Amino acid sequence: MVPATLDAAGLTALLCDRLEVTTGRPSTRDRELLDTFDGRLRATGLAAERSVGRGDTRAMTLREPGAPAREAQVTAAERYLAEDLPPGPLRDRLAPALGVRALLPLVRVRSRTRSLAVLNRDAKTVVRLELEDPEVVGNGAARLAPRLRVQPVLGYDKAFARTARVLTADLGLAEADAPLLDQALAAAGDRPRAAFSAAAAGLARGTRADNAAGQVLMRLADIADQNVPGTLADLDTEFLHDLRVSVRRARSVLREMRGVFPTAERAQLRSELRWVQALTGPVRDLDVQLLEWRKLTASLSDERRADVGPLHGLLSGRRTAEFRVLERGLRSRRFTDAMNYWRALAGLEPAPASAPERPLAGVAIEVVAGDRIRSVHRRMVRDGSAIEDASPPEALHDLRKRGKELRYLLELFGSVFPAAVVKPMVSTLKAMQDVLGRFHDRAVQAELLRGLGDELAVKEGGPQALMALGLVEEALLADQHAARAGFAERFQRFAAPEQRALVRDTFPKLGSQ
């Protein structure tokens, strides 16, 4: 990072004075900086950009410290899933970082750049420099601090170290404290989205339960609000997923914090959030089907995979119709009122001592949350221990729902308990939830596909698609069976005697203090 008192021209003059350098001709680079909404590239040290220009193609560049830049020509688009990128080194590196999220253009930056080469006594280039003078383009236009990129040349490590000393000790340059993307977003009046990905409120022990639960609910409302525009833009399915998770967590807080909020208001918000959950469910179910399409059809032969094409078209058409319903709901007055009511309840004043319907409002959060964690864990151990091979699927489904309650309690209120207990407990719970989630999801997927049979039969290629559909259902049910087979081992770890003792010792019981 270049000091604020020094501009690009001044730095160039100092470099020429302190080092033997040659300077190239200045040029202008206009590009859009890319990342996922939740900052996945930023979190892994990657930086992606896309050139700005005319035509249907753009140059995409991926930079990573210590590695050469990866480049590819991509089609101009509003978003890129990993599968949308052309095969090659850029896609191979981006795919694991992106997961199911979309790569989005977040901010446009135009830079005046100049290349410089540090020379040795033999006039050989030993270090390459690039001086960048960037500015944000658009409504949030703003000039950013100049940056100097330093690139070593193979075989000249001592020259690189000597150059680095001159830049830092003599010229006062320091490593940038934030990526260019962060500074550009801030200058444009935005902020890095990773700040909105975690729901933990960082609560302190001794905080009143009503204040603590209110902070958590407000944080969850912020996350929900941040994901509504992306859900409506329909560029990334994870916006809807994160919206649903924030709503589900808020419902869990309301369910588990009985005696903390006013009864009538708590019941009303729970009802409205249940409506939001139902509104968003159909599109999410279809998203899961389409996101896992390759996995669903992986066991089919090439011929059968071609036969099942009409089914994919049917799922996509159904999603388009369901999304219109979702869009109307999210733009409705009812949804706006529900969000406002959510914030109003989260921001309630502390309950007076004379409020009989809120007896737990003034109790320390570690006592209220601890009692609920203790109770839910005990019930899960009891119910899970009763599950055997002949138990109906509903028994595993109920245990899965209870597990979500426990996980949300631990994640949202875990900061008031020892991390050495909470983190391993969440990890063990997640391992069990993975198999329970697979078991449930495969059942939902199979049922959804089965329900499309009549509609699929009358479409062109329908009979062949129905035959292939049967094979897909078989694969889903086989995976569901495998998930159930893995349940017992993971439950044993979750319900081990030492784990039960740790829960009893860590999480207090109401009235025992």
Image (spheres, helix red, strand yellow):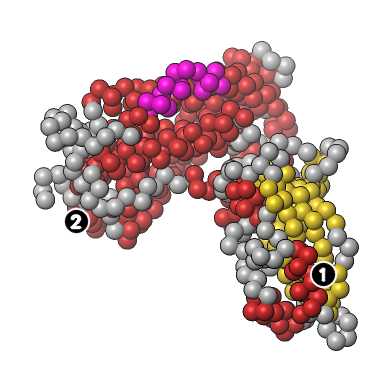
Amino acid type at circle 2 is Asp
Q: Main secondary structure of the magenta part?
A: helix
> Residue most toward the top?
458
The answer to whether the residues at label 1 and label 2 have Cβ atoms under 8 Å apart is no
Q: Indicate which disc residue 75 carries.
A: none
Amino acid identity at mark 1: Leu
Residue placed under numbered mark 2 in the picture = 505
Of callouts 1 and 2, the N-terminal one: 1
- Residue 205: horizontal and vertical position, in percent? 25, 53
Does residue 103 appear in the picture of this structure? no
Identified at 35% across, 29% down, the residue is 344
Instruction: Return the mark for residue 116.
Output: 1
Q: Is residue 164 left or right of residue 114?
A: left
Is residue 448 positioned above or below 56 on the image?
A: above
Residue 417 visible in rendering: yes
Residue 444, percent across and down? 48, 29
Residue at x 25%, y 48% (from the top left corner): 207
Nearer the camera: disc 1 or disc 2? 1
Residue numbers of the magenta segment: 327-342
Q: Position of residue 446 (x, y in %)?
A: 51, 28
- Decide whether residue 351 is among the magenta residues: no
